[in-house]
Image (spheres, rainbow, N blue to C red):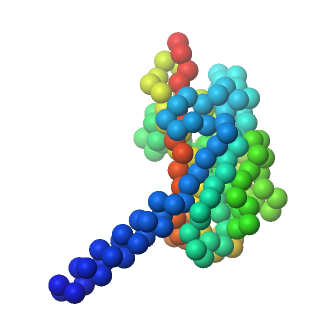
């Protein structure tokens, strides 16, 4: 038993060091700061540009065969949060996307707005600032068997089954009264 503990600690520290190197940045988002109105939804009473942000990532874990992107609001008043965007099957050689684009060959899943497309921030008027967790997932498979009807929950399940690592960038958004 005494020999197993140091081994486990060593393995956990090694994974943490590798995972810490995987980083997500954006020219459109600043960590823990409000998003631009370009990333606000166009509908449900919101009047934004509904444009997905520019994203770039670096230092993916060894063995990465594809990437996925999710945008999730845990503060939505639903009891289960709100999926704003899911994109899977991004080829491993792609390490950035331009604003408003989806990589060729990638598959978008159904958001909680009911469509397979980016759906921007749209918290209720007067509600506290919501957090929008932008995540790039490094996966151990080249493709996931998902289509445009895949819910955020199903995409999340599949990502957690195949994740080698993930990098997050959290931005906020609030609509004034």
> Taking the image as drawn, is residue 150 in sight?
no
Q: At 44% across and 25% down in the image, what residue appears?
A: 128
Picture coordinates of residue 4, whole percent (x, y): 25, 84
| Count of numbered circles in the view | 0
Q: Is residue 88 above or below residue 49?
A: below
Picture coordinates of residue 155, whole percent (x, y): 59, 59
Q: At 76% across and 46% down in the image, what residue appears?
A: 98
Residue 75: name its quadrant: top left
Residue 59: name its quadrant: bottom right
Picture coordinates of residue 72, whole percent (x, y): 54, 45
Direction from residue 95 to residue 104 in the image, left or right:
right
Q: At 53% across and 50% down in the image, what residue appears?
A: 168
Q: Is residue 31 above or below residue 63?
A: above
Q: At 66% across and 73% down in the image, what residue appears?
A: 65
Direction from residue 74 to residue 135 in the image, left or right:
right
Q: Is residue 148 above or below residue 92?
A: above
């Amino acid at each position: 038993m005494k020999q197993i503990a140091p081994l486990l600690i060593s393995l956990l520290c090694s994974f943490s060091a590798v995972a810490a190197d995987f980083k997500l940045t954006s020219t459109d988002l600043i960590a823990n700061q409000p998003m631009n109105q370009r990333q606000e939804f166009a509908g449900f009473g919101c009047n934004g540009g509904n444009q997905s942000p520019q994203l770039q990532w670096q230092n993916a874990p060894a063995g990465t065969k594809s990437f996925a992107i999710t945008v999730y609001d845990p503060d939505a008043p639903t009891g289960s949060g709100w999926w704003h965007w899911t994109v899977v099957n991004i080829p491993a050689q792609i390490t950035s996307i331009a604003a408003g684009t989806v990589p060729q060959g990638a598959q978008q899943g159904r958001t909680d707005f009911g469509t397979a497309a980016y759906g921007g921030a749209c918290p209720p008027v007067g509600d506290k600032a919501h957090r929008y967790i932008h995540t790039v997932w490094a996966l151990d498979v080249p493709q996931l068997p998902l289509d445009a009807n895949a819910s955020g929950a199903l995409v999340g399940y599949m990502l957690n089954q195949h994740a080698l690592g993930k990098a997050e960038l959290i931005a906020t958004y609030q609509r004034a009264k």
